[in-house]
Amino acid sequence: YVMCRVEEKYYRFSPIKLGHILSIAVDKEHRRKGIATSLMRGAEEGLVGAYGVDVIYLEVRVSNQPAISLYKKLGYNILGIMPRYYSDGEDGYLMVKPISEKADDRLINAVLGYRVRK
């Protein structure tokens, strides 16, 4: 499954739509078969096509190298680290994928940068 939501922020008095990938999971028996890639692409298509998001972002454990590799392959970049983000104390990365032309580094840092340490 994949779960996401649309959020709205403002940057320079203009609305910015953010797609937030909240959770994605594939049963262990079915990993390494392209299912997560298909789920992510489907979520992205829905967020962009149905809701017109400008940026998509997600959080991932710093230790989850397979997921980080997948997200990088799909065009996500690490914006920064979120210290002790998870309940067990592990740090998380905030990863972002700009979608619209207005989603430049300045906008992304303004609407999401407060959440991370760089």
Image (tube, grey):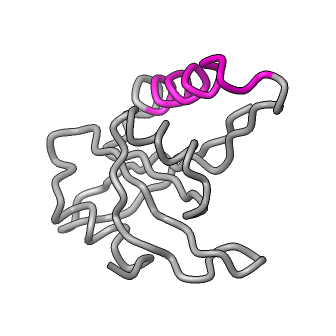
Looking at the picture, does residue 61 appear above or below residue 99? below
Q: Is residue 32 magenta?
A: yes
Disc count in the image? 0
**Between 110 and 117, which is closer to the camera in this rendering?**
117
Q: Quadrant of the N terminus?
A: top right
Position of residue 52 in the picture relative to residue 37 (left or right):
left
At x 41%, y 45%, the residue is 56
Seen at 36% across and 58% down, the residue is 78
Q: Nearer the viewer, residue 100 or 97?
A: 97
Residue at 38% x, 70% y: name it: 80
Q: Is residue 25 above or below residue 83?
A: above
Q: Position of residue 43 (x, y in %)?
A: 55, 29
Q: Which residue appears at 32% of the width and 78% of the height?
A: 118
Q: Is 64 on the left or on the right of 18, as rendered?
A: right
Q: Specify the quadrant of the image occupied by residue 15.
A: bottom left
Magenta stretch containing residue 40, yes or no? yes
- The picture places residue 86, in percent across and down from the top left corner, at 69, 73
Coordinates of residue 91 in the picture (x, y in percent) = 58, 75
Q: Against 107, is 97 above or below?
A: above
Chain part drawn in magenta? 30-47
Locate residue 27: give its quadrant: top right
Magenta residues: mostly which secondary structure? helix
Vertical order, 98 against 14 (above or below): above
Q: Position of residue 36 (x, y in %)?
A: 62, 28
Left or right position of 15 against 34:
left
